[in-house]
Image (spheres, rainbow, N blue to C red):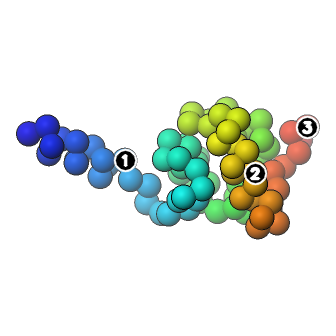
Amino acid sequence: MAKCLSSICAVSHVPKGNFLQGVIAMPARRALEKEKIDSLEKLSHYSEKEILQLHGFGKDTLLKLKIYMMENDIYFRNNES
């Protein structure tokens, strides 16, 4: 029975797309999905400060995301905006 419950739980929490799969962990990807952020272009409309406020994001995850964005020539909006 427990095996069934855990598989149902796992299936119900799988993000719909594979945006940033292999770049950042699932909690952070789910947080982005909840905010309807499913592309680097949409992500660029947010500041680092705004993304850090999402559940699942810490400094390490933000750094990984920032490096990935820079590799793709995409940047966060300025924190001052």
- Between the residue at mark 1 and the residue at mark 2, the CA separation in whole angstroms equals 25 Å
Compare residues 58 and 43 and report the one nearer the observer. Answer: 58
Q: Which mark is residue 28?
A: none
Q: Does residue 44 appear in the picture of this structure? A: no
- Disc 1 versus disc 2: nearer the observer: 2
Image location of residue 12, percent across then percent down:
31, 49
Residue 70's place in the image compared with 54, above or below, is below
Residue tagged 3? 80
Disc assigned to residue 13: 1
Q: Please report whichever mark, 1 or 2, sits nearer to the chain's N-terminal start.
A: 1
Q: Residue furthest left?
A: 1
Q: Residue 57: which quarter of the image?
A: top right
Residue 2 shows in the view: yes
Q: Residue 63, how many percent across, how many down? A: 73, 45
Say few, some or many: other residues with alpha carbon within 10 Å of mark 3 (under 14 / 14 to 19 / 20 or more): few
Report helix, strand or loop for mark 3.
loop
- Which residue: 76% across, 54% down? 67
- Say which amino acid is labelled 2: Lys
Q: Secondary structure at mark 2?
A: helix
Foreground label between 2 and 3: 2
Residue type, mark 3 in image? Glu
Disc 3 versus disc 1: nearer the observer: 1
Residue identifier under label 2: 66
Q: Earlier in the sequence, mark 3 or mark 1?
A: 1
Q: Residue drawn at (64%, 62%), measured in percent from left and top?
A: 39
